[in-house]
Amino acid sequence: MQFIQSITRISVLAAGIAGALACGQAHAAAFQLKENSAKGQGRAFAGSISAPDDASVVGTNPAAMRLLDGRQFQFDVSTIRFSAKYSGEAHDALGRPLTGGNGGDAGMIAPLPSVYAHLPVGDKLHFGASLMVPFGFETDYSRNWVGRYNGLRTKLQAVDLGVSMSYDVNPYVSFGVSVFAERLNVQLTNAVDFGGILAGSGVPGYLPASADGMSSLKGDNTQVGFTVGGLFSITDDTHIGINYRSQMVHKVTGGTVDFYVPGDAAAIFGATRPGWFTDTKGRATITLPELATISLTHRINDQWSIMADVSRTAWSKFDSVRVHMNSGQPDNMLNFGYRDTTFASIGADYRLNDQLTLRGGLAYDQTPTTNEHRDVRVPDASRKWVSLGLSWAPGEHAEYNIGYTHLFASDPRIVDLTSTTGTVLDGHYKVSSDILAASINYKF
């Protein structure tokens, strides 16, 4: 009981830390995050739910807790460096070039924490607690850039606090389930071309880009989800893991929509379209995708182990988000047009001696975005991973891990139309990213 109370206190504290830090650009498809384990990072997350001695399985495949050695606590932190620089042009509805710069570097450097605890009870039962950030991203452009009507700041973070249980049917078959509470926070800001809106309505004295304003949408929601998994050991050296993470439907009912309307434009809208572009409450439904993974780990001998992972994410559920405003203004439709994606990786561990293990991995990570639907908020592209890592265990109780990944991505093309005023952004991005992860695992 004292162990569980201690883990609860640590998890609540860590949840606050994660909420404050988890705002880096995602480094799996779109804004999905895989960065939950330094050991997994070092092998490009091959064997992520089937490899032994990595407590991150508490949250991703609780059935694999069978492969953990006794009571243990693990803390991971991944530092993500993401860079996204736009190059191109933009035109207003009249075909005139828009003024402004390229927005600067919309990416950033951000830490991402994860926490896990494992408690075996008897010979067959396992309990655990976890804190993870499965989704998150942030892009931030300078206020006067040419794509300001398409997006300025975008921030989404989902923090999961979960409890897990598994049962070992026998030494070769285990099943497990994790139930988690997920807190979602969303913030979207962009400039609004009120000059273009008024010009399109026939109001004299206004032209596109002649009266810029701002809009800001904020909302949050908490929902409960689950992960189920199985671990099947063909032999003592070969393990197959499977998992399924549930879809999360967040119904944001108490969101806020704030506007800044310049000059006489506010009075014009107040007289001609009451309720439009006024601060109001709003609601929206945001569906985060379900995920399924199959994973293989095989120990060749006392030194070499090989791993592989294939996962499928149902991003097509994230097709669009409709924002309803209580002021009576027409709904704002955010169209994403995502497609389902596949992530595949291979990796290997080399046990140099009792204290030091080296590892590496390669992965292909498909983006759900396409040239037709890609936008400035998530300038995503498919990428290839190259990962390296090591583990150092100076004694029987503590193990330290480091993992590093460099992501190779093509420069994504973007043609983004602002439907309300007809401005068009046409160009491409230069993107690059690196991930450095570290962890400590303590057994007691």
Image (cartoon, helix red, strand yellow):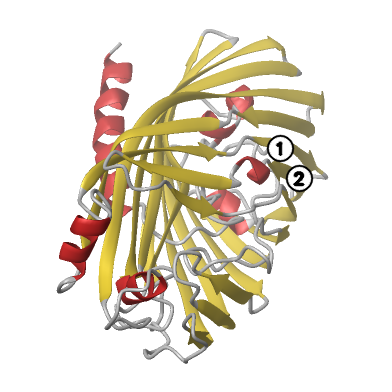
Of residue 122 and residue 188, the one placed in the foreground of this image is 188
Give me the residue at 63% from left, 27% from top. Answer: 64
Residue 236 versus residue 291 in the image, above or below: above
Give me the residue at 30% from left, 11% from top. Answer: 1
Indicate left or right for 301 with 194 as reference. right
- From where the camera sits, is residue 117 visible? yes
Judging by the rendered image, the residue that carries numbered circle 1 is 293
The quadrant of the rendering that contains the C terminus is: top left
Residue 237 versus residue 307 in the image, above or below: above
Give the mark, 1 or 2, whose residue is nearer the N terminus.
Answer: 1
Give me the residue at 33% from left, 71% from top. Answer: 198
Residue 310 versus residue 362 in the image, above or below: above
Q: Are marks 1 and 2 in contact (CB under 8 Å)?
A: yes
Q: Give the residue type that dot 2 points to.
A: Val
Q: Position of residue 435 (x, y in %)?
A: 50, 65
Q: Give the residue type that dot 1 points to.
A: Thr
Where, by quadrant of the figure, is residue 367 drawn?
bottom right
Give me the residue at 67% from left, 29% from top. Answer: 243
Indicate left or right for 410 with 118 as reference. right
Q: Residues within 10 Å of mark 2 (few under 14, many from 20)?
A: many
Judging by the rendered image, the residue that carries numbered circle 2 is 310
SS category of the residue bearing label 1:
strand
Where, by quadrant of the figure, is residue 247 drawn?
top right
Q: Residues within 10 Å of mark 1 (few under 14, many from 20)?
A: many
